[in-house]
Image (spheres, rainbow, N blue to C red):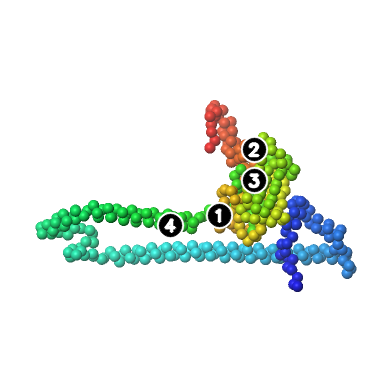
Amino acid sequence: MSRPDYTNDDRFDGLFLQIAHQTQGIEPLLDTLFSFLRRKSDFFTPPAGGDAEAAIAKVNEVVRKHADIYLKDKRREEEEKLKRREAAEAKKKKKKKDAEAAAAAEKRKEENNEGVIEMGEDGFDISNDEPPPSSKPAAAKVAADISDVKSDAPTISATKTEQHKTDGSKDDNNTQETEKEEEEEEDNSPPPIGNGGTIDGKYVWTQTLQELTINIPLPENTRGRDLNVVISKKHLKVGFAKKNKNNNDFIVNDNLTKPIIVDDSLWTIEDGNRLVLTLQKSNQMEWWDAPCQSDFPKINIQKVQPENSNLSDLDGETRQTVEKMMFDQRQKALGLPTADEQKKLDILEKFKASHPEMDFSNAKIS
């Protein structure tokens, strides 16, 4: 039996996630690991002899190995991003080149048609839609033809009208389909932040291929015993243990978009004002468009970027945006102004202070 590749072993991710959430930091997590090795193993006093320096050397060796793996994976990701970018640019250039070629061909066709003279049945030039010279016999013949056609005019008009309506409906359908295709092709909206989004009045969520993270704003100094959290395979229920005038029965009570692994999912309260739920996906090869089935809006999973989406793993700008969304959610829940609304109020207060002679009693902020 071959030895498993422990450098990429994810069987214990759920256990380590629970330890990480409880230790709240890299150094405490490592202290916990080495405390176990010191107290429950002979790691620092190997039976083959040696001292603690051998243990330190082994730790350095393992750390270096994983650092090399990380750098290799990062280089590969950068190379793949570069290839995707180059492919997109090449596709854009080809599309532009094809459009220019089509325009040039159309122009040549128009130039070739400029010298063509169109002749009618009577031998006259009708290229400019000018009527041929009239003669008395010809005029008499035309008058006779007109009198014959008048009797059939209603039938002809009705037939043409019906045909026009049919053609018009087809054109409308084709136009709607074309507009829909163009909208899909020209969707230049940015990718969802953290591969997730905001469910107004409820929470902010992010995701990776393996797990989904939901951040729910809570009143200050909320403790675990104040909440009622029930995580099941296909349903999520989050509420307060005791209902009062400021709290509804449940913040979330809905079926999940897809099933999860309950044993590897957990929740914790951070900073006393934020509930963090980590839901382990059953199928770890697909993206979710929303945590719960009735959530709206749903994200476009075609725009998802396969990167780490835990709040602590996001880059500074993205993390600041997510934290702002969470702050706005908490303010709305408390009936207070959001960050943008507060900024407008501050500007108004400064303006009022600069112009005490003006009456702002009926001023409205939009």
Q: Is residue 98 visible?
A: yes
The residues tagged by marks 1 and 2 sit, at their Cα atoms, a distance apart of 30 Å
Badge number at residue 178:
4
- Whichever of callouts 4 and 2 sits on the residue coming sooner in the sequence is 4
- Whichever of callouts 4 and 1 sits on the residue coming sooner in the sequence is 4
> Is 54 displayed left or right of 21 in the figure?
right
Instruction: Identify the residue shown where x is 19% and y is 53%.
Output: 151
Residue 329's place in the image compared with 304, above or below, is above
As rendered, which of 101 and 204 lies closer to the eye? 204
Label 2 residue SS: loop
Label 3 residue SS: strand
Picture quarter with the N terminus: bottom right
Label 4 residue SS: helix
Q: Quadrant of residue 173?
A: bottom left
Instruction: Kindly identify which residue carries mark 1.
Output: 300
Residue 8 x, y percent position in the rendering: 71, 65
The residues tagged by marks 4 and 2 sit, at their Cα atoms, a distance apart of 46 Å
Instruction: Kindly identify which residue carries mark 2.
Output: 334
Instruction: Identify the residue shown where x is 53% and y is 31%.
Output: 363
Q: Amino acid at mark 2?
A: Leu
As rendered, which of 72 and 160 lies closer to the eye? 160
Label 3 crowd (10 A; few <14 / some 14-19 / many >=20) = some
